[in-house]
Image (spheres, grey):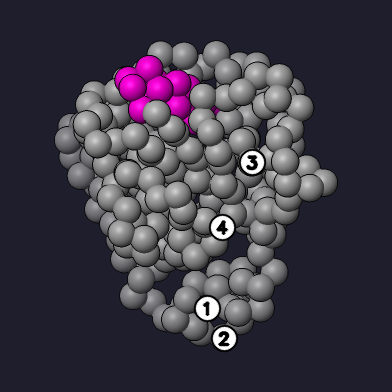
């Protein structure tokens, strides 16, 4: 059997070659395969992306008009505001899966830039906190997609990113494999705040996909307990079909 360190090295090299391939080979549109472009998507496909419509300002649940949904009126979440750029529909689901699991850094880079262009930055937060991965999952994947999105937003806005403030201390099962109720309990105690800067009063959590909101609810709660006054959420896409 190959030593574990050798396996990790081969995984790292394989993932790095995949990522480099997406950057060096001339791009055709990832979705339709049309003419080569400097971006991983053509202008026609970009124009047809499913932007999120009117939604709850707190949790981003779709509404007929902007407001606060009944659930948030009944039980206010630990985070104050949520901004979501896209609905998690085709082709956004395909793009995020490629960025998250297929090491397509060109697509991930594009999604980060699109988020930065469409988010409302004011009032300006003190820091961006990407949702952390457990170290074991980070080694398996090779990168944290939420961190990569945060880096692109930071480059566009100048808002700093911090990856040391919080740790994922429990390697929980993937949320996608669980029901709505299981998602809520799956993350209890999964995050630990290691430190917060004295000047942090307003921080933003960065994530790729929001479904029930269980991940950001748990993460926001630990930051609020650590003394942060306001926690907001900026997410690439929102699934509007919650699991049972």
Of the two numbered discs 1 and 2 on the same chain, state the one appearing first in sequence.
Answer: 1
Q: Is residue 222 magenta?
A: yes
Of the two numbered discs 4 and 2 on the same chain, state the one appearing first in sequence.
Answer: 2
Front residue of this view, candidates 81 and 194: 81
Q: Are marks 1 and 2 in contact (CB under 8 Å)?
A: yes
What residue is shown with label 3?
A: 57
What residue is shown with label 2?
A: 35
The label nearer to you, 3 versus 1, is 3
Quarter occupied by residue 24: bottom left
Residue furthest out toward the right: 64
Horizontal side, residue 42 vs residue 16: left or right = right
Seen in the picture, residue 148 relative to 110 is either above or below; the reply is: above
What residue appears at the point 61 percent right and 71 percent down from the top-left corner? 46
Q: Which residues are magenta?
A: 214-228
What residue is shown with label 1?
A: 28
Neighbour tally class for label 3: few under 14, some 14-19, many 20 plus, Cα within 10 Å? some
CA–CA distance between discs 4 and 2? 18 Å
CA–CA distance between discs 4 and 3? 25 Å
The label nearer to you, 1 versus 4, is 4
What residue is shown with label 4?
A: 95
CA–CA distance between discs 1 and 4? 14 Å
Q: Are marks 4 and 3 in contact (CB under 8 Å)?
A: no
Seen in the picture, residue 209 relative to 74 is either above or below; the reply is: below
């Amino acid at each position: 059997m190959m030593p574990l360190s050798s396996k990790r090295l081969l995984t790292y090299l394989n993932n790095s070659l995949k990522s480099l391939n997406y950057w060096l080979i001339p791009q055709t549109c990832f979705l339709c395969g049309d003419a080569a472009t400097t971006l991983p998507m053509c202008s026609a496909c970009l124009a047809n992306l499913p932007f999120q419509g009117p939604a709850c300002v707190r949790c981003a649940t779709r509404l007929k008009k902007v407001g606060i949904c009944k659930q948030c009126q009944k039980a206010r979440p630990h985070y104050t505001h949520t901004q979501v750029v896209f609905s998690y529909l085709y082709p956004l689901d395909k793009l995020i899966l490629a960025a998250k699991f297929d090491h397509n850094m060109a697509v991930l880079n594009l999604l980060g830039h699109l988020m930065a262009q469409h988010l409302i930055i004011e009032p300006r937060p003190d820091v961006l906190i990407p949702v952390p991965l457990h170290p074991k999952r980070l080694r398996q994947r090779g990168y944290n997609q939420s961190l990569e999105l945060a880096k692109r937003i930071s480059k566009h806005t100048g808002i700093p990113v911090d990856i040391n403030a919080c740790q994922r201390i429990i390697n929980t099962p993937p949320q996608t494999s669980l029901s709505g109720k299981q998602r809520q309990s799956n993350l209890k105690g999964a995050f630990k705040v290691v430190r917060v800067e004295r000047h942090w009063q307003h921080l933003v959590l960065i994530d790729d996909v929001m479904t029930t909101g269980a991940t950001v609810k748990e993460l926001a709660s630990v930051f609020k307990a650590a003394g942060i006054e306001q926690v907001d959420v900026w997410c690439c896409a929102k699934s509007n079909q919650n699991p049972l």
